[in-house]
């Protein structure tokens, strides 16, 4: 996950953008930090979904499968 300092910096830049126009360097920094945040968020979600198990009525645990894996099984 992304560290608190970087998240605080994103918030700081967003607040600054509401007060005044950001400089080119600030725009670039904010874009880079946002991209890093989104990538970390997506990776966290993937890791979480990889640990999800479906429990059927008999108590059998089945891991979630990716959509592409399900499509390949049908063919």
Image: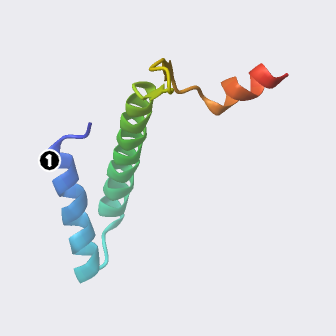
Q: How far across and down, in percent of the image, does residue 48 sit? A: 38, 32
Question: Left or right: 15 with respect to 23?
Answer: left
Left or right, residue 4 beside residue 45: left
Q: Quadrant of the N terminus?
A: top left
Q: Residue 36, located in which quarter of the rendered image?
A: top left
Which image quarter: residue 73?
top right
Q: Residue at x 48, y 17 (%)?
A: 60
The answer to whether any part of residue 20 appears in the image is no
Q: Nearer the viewer, residue 66 or 25?
A: 66
Q: Residue at x 16, y 55 (%)?
A: 8
Q: Is residue 73 visible?
A: yes
Helix, strand or loop status at disc 1 = helix
Tell how many labels: 1
Badge 1 density bin: few <14, some 14–19, many ≥20, Cα 10 Å = few
| Residue 59 position by quadrant | top left
Residue that appears at 29% across and 61% down: 26
- Residue annotated with mark 1: 5
Tell me residue 18's x, y (percent): 27, 79
Residue situated furthest bottom in the rendering: 19
Query: Horizontally, is 63 left or right of 24 in the view?
Result: right
Name the spot of residue 63 as percent of width and height, x first: 50, 22
């Amino acid at each position: 996950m992304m560290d608190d300092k970087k998240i605080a910096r994103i918030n700081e830049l967003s607040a600054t953008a509401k007060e005044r126009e950001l400089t080119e360097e600030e725009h670039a920094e904010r874009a880079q930090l946002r991209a890093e945040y989104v990538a970390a968020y997506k990776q966290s979600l993937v890791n979480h979904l990889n640990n999800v198990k479906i429990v059927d009525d008999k108590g059998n645990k089945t891991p979630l499968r990716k959509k592409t894996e399900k499509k390949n099984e049908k063919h």
